[in-house]
Image (cartoon, helix red, strand yellow):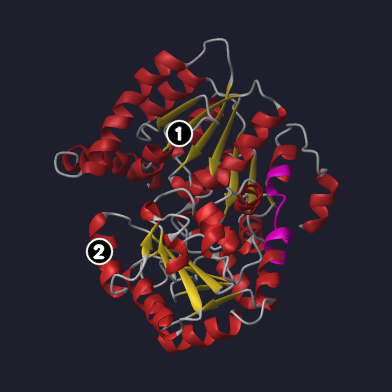
Amino acid sequence: MSKVLYYLGIHIYGIFIFLASFFNEKARKLRKGQQETFELLEEEIERKSRYVWFHAASLGEFEQGRPVMEQMKREQPDTKIILTFFSPSGYEVRKDYKGANIVAYLPLDTAHNARKFVKKVKPSKAIFIKYEFWPNYLLELQKAKVPVYSISAIFRPEQVFFRWYGKWYRDLLGTFKHIFVQDKNSLDLLQKNGIATASVCGDTRFDRVSDLAQQAKSLPLMEEFVKDGKKIIVAGSTWPKDEELLVQYLKMHPESKLVLVPHEIHQSHIMDISKLLDGKFVRYTDATIENVKTTNCLVVDVIGVLSSIYRYANVAYIGGGFGVGIHNTLEAAVYSVPVVFGTNYKKFREARELIAIGGAFSISNYVVLEAHLDRLLKDDKAGRIAGEYVRNNTGATELILKEINLPNSSKGVDAVEQKH
């Protein structure tokens, strides 16, 4: 019954995307991209090459798979990689990613599309990232005897695999040659349900942020902004509620400085921020070596520099905790910077663990925010804890590559296995 319902549901979903594409831009991009995939493959696939296929739902999952892709390329430069996305928010941002030979949308998970895709690509391996489990593709890969791996996976009891009606979905987990999970709870859940081909390797995002920290850009404007020695709060991916609290703190504490990096940088949002700050700030795009010395607030209205800016922080505030959920805490913690965020963090394992060890703090209102910032700006103990946490959790990429029979990296797998 589950199988029939899924097949029916996926076709209904396809119809929904078709209808939505007439008035919704995201649906329109998804449908158009899926339609163009086979034409793209026809043009780009090298017939005599074998590809390693990576699939990510969206941008976050891509970042988890990225360390594995890039390590593959470093160790075996001739490796051909095809990268597919389900969501436009992932594809549109990374369609020009140089780490893959081909980047495309994944066609809808129908039996016909799966059969056609696998036949066209002929992957030597398939690697699905975190939550991606597409039944028809998994079954077609199994028929073609293609080894399939799941990396950075997380499992919870409420997922469909473990429901009383979920046997068909649960059996699909058996199509994976190996499932690399992030934590022991996920492993225990799989083993309890008869899935033995799994192991704990951690989260590849720790490797990604470590790579980012090593490649951090030199930012002359930031160097000038922090030169006077005042304590620096870097607020990343902020939303309006976050910004209201942070600006209130800045006004009450002129002895500190604020770097505000909004999640949305369109003009109307920047104008709203300007009103909060009474116009007393400098936009990053307008900043010069001279005028950054005259302000205690820098509003970053460009994309792609946040991970480098965190290195200048004494405290990092991570946005989204009063709405959709917090953004990436690890990008800041890797620099041994303590992190602060709102109340919507519980679905993020690293946030829960950082709070438990004293490297992160959740705030519900201004009074709590002020108390935490006052303390953290004077004491770097929490920052040291956050940095150590990241360092102790790197190494997932090496464990994954060892298991799928690719060469080990220079660090040595034995050392990494001891850390897990």
Q: How far apart are the alpha carbons under marks 2 and 1?
A: 37 Å
Marker count (numbered): 2
Please state which amino acid type lies under the numbered disc 2: Met
Residue underneath mark 1: 84
Name the element at disc 1.
strand
Q: In the image, is residue 63 above or below residue 53? A: below
Give whichever of discs 2 and 1 has the lower sequence position: 1
Determine if the magenta segment contains residue 179. no
Residue underneath mark 2: 271
Please report the bounds of the magenta region as a residue range.
Answer: 388-398
Q: Residue furthest top?
A: 48
Q: Residue at x 83, y 43 (%)?
A: 412
Q: Residue at x 56, y 74 (%)?
A: 230
| Residue in the foreground of this view, choosing between 300 and 10 | 300
Name the element at disc 2.
helix
Image location (x, y in percent) of residue 57: 44, 44
